[in-house]
Amino acid sequence: MASQLPPAQPQGFVKQLTLLFVAIASGLVIFCGVAFYINQTQPIGSEELNGIFSVAAPAGSLLLAAVGYFALPAFLSRAPQTPYLQSKLGFYRTATIVRLAFWDAGGFICLVSYLLTGNNMYLAYLFPIVALFVLFSPNRDRVIQDLSLTSEEAKELS
């Protein structure tokens, strides 16, 4: 039996979305700390892998970051027109999860590349992805703007 997310309730929606955001972003931060610790204490870097990852990591993380950036507007443009705020918020939550998953995957590509090669350059590729997380963190105004909510719907979102 497939599990479904409960309907998105307007009250506390932004808090729930923020909690989800923090959970996903903290996984990336924690793994970054673990990878850095491992490379400082017991380097497992490989020069032969550095050649492969020197192209794959920046290209893959850039591609996933771009897909994640454009995923939310693409999802929202295909959203069914509904007068129900709960439906709109549920669709927005799903689109946000997809966006964050793409960015998270791009970040993990950089971190795994760093872990396997020991090359600090891959940590530098992680910074633009972290910047995307910071710049597009969920907040009430962003939800209202992205969903083009009416003033009545915006009041319910509090």
Image (spheres, rainbow, N blue to C red):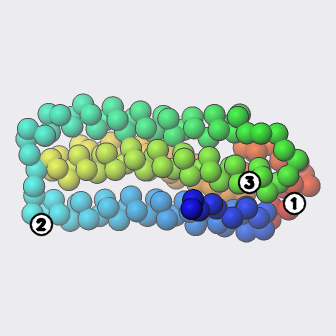
Against 97, residue 12 (above or below) is: below
**Upstream in sequence: badge 3 or badge 2:** 2
Residue at the disc numbered 2? 41
Question: What is the C-alpha distance between the residues marked 3 and 1?
Answer: 14 Å
Task: Give the quadrant of the N terminus.
Answer: bottom right
Give the number of the mark in front: 3 or 1. 3
Question: What is the C-alpha distance between the residues marked 3 and 2?
Answer: 45 Å
Q: How busy is the neighbourhood of tag 3: few (under 14 within 10 Å), some, or many (20 plus)?
A: many
Residue 93 in the figure: left or right of residue 66? right
Residue at the disc numbered 1? 155
Q: Are marks 3 and 2 in contact (CB under 8 Å)?
A: no
Name the amino acid type tagged 2.
Answer: Thr
Q: Of residues 65 and 77, which is closer to you in this image?
A: 77
**Upstream in sequence: badge 3 or badge 1:** 3
Task: Give the quadrant of the C terminus.
Answer: bottom right
Residue at the disc numbered 3? 89
Residue 73 in the figure: left or right of residue 147? left
Q: Of residues 121 and 92, which is closer to you in this image?
A: 92
